[in-house]
Amino acid sequence: MTAANSRKSSVNTKKLALMGVLTGIMVVLGYVNIPMPAGLSITFNMIPVAIAGMAMGLWGGTAMGAVFGLISFLQCFGIIGTSGMGAALVAEAPWWMSFVQRFVTRVLMGFLTALIYKTLKGRMRNTYLHGAITGFSAAFLNTLLFMSALVLLFGHTEYLQEKMAGRAFLAYIVASVGVNGLVEMATAAVLTGAIGVALKKARLI
């Protein structure tokens, strides 16, 4: 094996190990969601997705988005944490609708986040800045896709109609994700930027 191939193999091994660590972190984070009055929760699971997209590209971001989505879907059934909203919606509507809202949107979020990082990496030299933008984008896309699917798929349900309390869809979304979104986006930006610098030093990105 040549020196170049040896280095490439070492980097690939490190990336696979990183994927395993991120998956473990994702499972732990599944139990630490912070509930909010609107029925939603503050979550930081988009951060490992952003990190995977930075270190492993489109396939890494998509795969970690799938892990996020699977955990989120299982929470509807009390597995790897619980989701009161998820359980209520599964009880009122077909299970596949929750699968689309919680799994499919997270896979798409992971892919788009990795794509954003890939685009920024070719145009920006500041590792912290494009890492921070990637983290922010992951949180923003997670909120946008999740809430859009929630309204489109479950807007007719008694549970969501009660939560909306007569408000228009857009007004409900803004009121529901105001605090959640700000906290998630700010935290994801700061942490992902810092982690991006560390990954750069470790030659993983």
Image (cartoon, rainbow, N blue to C red):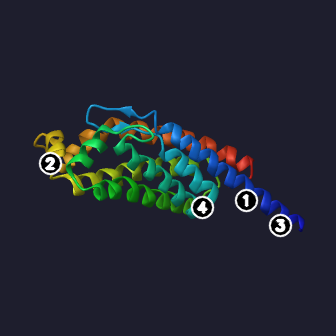
What amino acid is found at the position of numbered circle 2 in the picture?
Answer: Ala
- Residue 168 is tagged as 2
- Of 12 and 47, the residue lying toward us: 12
* Camera sees residue 127: no
Label 4, on which residue?
A: 57
Q: State whether residue 28 is above or below residue 204.
A: above
On the rendered structure, is 168 left or right of 173? Answer: left
Q: Residues within 10 Å of mark 1 (few under 14, many from 20)?
A: some
Secondary element type, mark 4: helix
- Of 58 and 63, the residue lying toward us: 63
What amino acid is found at the position of numbered circle 1 in the picture?
Answer: Asn
Give the percent coordinates (x, y) of residue 39: 27, 37
Give the percent coordinates (x, y) of residue 102: 37, 52
Report the number of numbered marks: 4
- Residue 5 is tagged as 3
For the residues labelled 1 and 2, the Cα–Cα distance comes to 49 Å
Quarter holding residue 120: bottom right
Secondary element type, mark 1: helix
Comparing labels 3 and 2, the label whose residue is closer to the camera: 3
The residue that appears at 31% across and 41% down in the rendered structure is: 177
